[in-house]
Image (cartoon, rainbow, N blue to C red):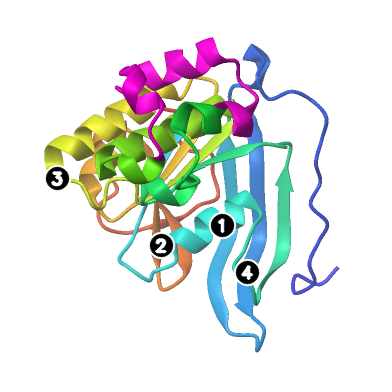
């Protein structure tokens, strides 16, 4: 089949949560390109394997294609864009943490009730996860997201992603609007709330995120995704290998 013809996404029934899944790809891209309706190429990924339990940082300047890579990993693209190549996954659930926490939440539905309704989690678990992200005040649970501060809404979006129990969590510039202290706090929350068998992919323009997470490092430049190998200097190596898992 031509690499310019879209291939069917293959979803498998096997679990990605067992201990035997460590080191196995949960999502792969091969000869993947995202194009506009007129054929303009916006993103190119020659080969990428995302493994269970990895921490992956995606860096690059604004407009380079970081968010589009996350869209490609999630399998959802903005209207008018299409994928050619192959996207293979065993996942049925993917969590997402947006740049602005409010973008993940209904603005008018009280927080705790909203998280219970969206995820199906029982009240006790919702309370536990909200407490884990620093929102343990019951008064906050009854507030609408529009009544939360920006930092509180961001924490709530992390809690929402965690409550989905998704094997893969994508976070799109979750610290870009935060000061250094709040950035580090949010990263710690993500690292603590995302379990060791879950995979976390964070898009960022901040190299401190790479250092803080101790993450595998993908770089996007003019829509081309490459993997940066630690200690290899400024040169980029195409993302053809799994990299380190943590």
- Label 2, residues with CA under 10 Å away: few <14, some 14-19, many ≥20: many
Q: Quadrant of the N terminus?
A: bottom right
* Residue for badge 2: 220
Numbered range of the magenta stretch: 116-144
Q: Are marks 3 and 2 in contact (CB under 8 Å)?
A: no
Residue 124 visible from this viewpoint: yes
Q: Looking at the image, do the residues carrying marks 1 and 4 touch, with CB atoms under 8 Å apart?
A: no
Task: Answer left or right for 85 relative to 67.
Answer: right
Residue at mark 3: 179
Q: Quadrant of the C terminus?
A: top left
State whether residue 217 appears in this view.
Answer: no
Assess whether mark 2 and mark 1 are in contact (beta carbons under 8 angstroms).
no
Quickly name the residue at label 1: 71
Lower position in the chain sequence, tag 1 or tag 4: 4
What residue is shown at x 23% (from left), y 48% (from top)?
207
**In the rendering, at what x and y percent does residue 13 appear?**
83, 30
Foreground disc of the pair 1, 2 = 1
Which residue is identified by label 4?
33
Is there CB contact under 8 Å for labels 3 and 1?
A: no
- Between residues 15 and 1, which one lies in front from this camera angle? 15
Q: CA distance from mark 1 to mark 4?
A: 12 Å
């Amino acid at each position: 089949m031509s690499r310019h013809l879209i291939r069917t996404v293959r979803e498998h029934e096997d679990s990605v949560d067992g201990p035997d899944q460590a080191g196995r790809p949960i999502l792969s891209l091969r000869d993947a390109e995202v194009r506009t309706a007129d054929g303009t190429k916006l993103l190119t990924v020659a080969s990428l394997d995302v493994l269970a339990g990895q921490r992956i940082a995606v860096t690059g300047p604004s407009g380079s294609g970081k968010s589009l890579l996350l869209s490609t990993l999630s399998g959802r693209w903005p209207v008018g864009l299409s994928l050619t190549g192959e996207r293979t996954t065993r996942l049925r659930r993917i969590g997402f943490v947006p740049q602005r926490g409010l973008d993940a939440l209904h603005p008018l539905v009280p927080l705790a009730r909203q998280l219970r309704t969206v995820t199906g989690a029982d009240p006790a678990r919702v309370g536990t996860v909200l407490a884990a992200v620093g929102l343990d005040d019951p008064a906050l649970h009854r507030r609408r997201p529009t009544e939360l501060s920006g930092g509180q809404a961001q924490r709530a979006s992390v809690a929402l992603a965690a409550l989905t129990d998704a094997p893969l969590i994508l976070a799109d510039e979750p610290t870009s609007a935060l000061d250094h202290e709040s950035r580090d706090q949010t990263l710690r929350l993500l690292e603590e709330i995302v379990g060791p068998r879950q995979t976390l992919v964070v898009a960022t323009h901040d190299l401190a995120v790479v250092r803080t997470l101790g993450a595998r490092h993908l770089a996007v430049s003019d829509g081309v995704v490459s993997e940066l190998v630690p200690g290899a200097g400024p040169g980029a190596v195409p993302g053809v290998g799994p990299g380190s898992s943590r």
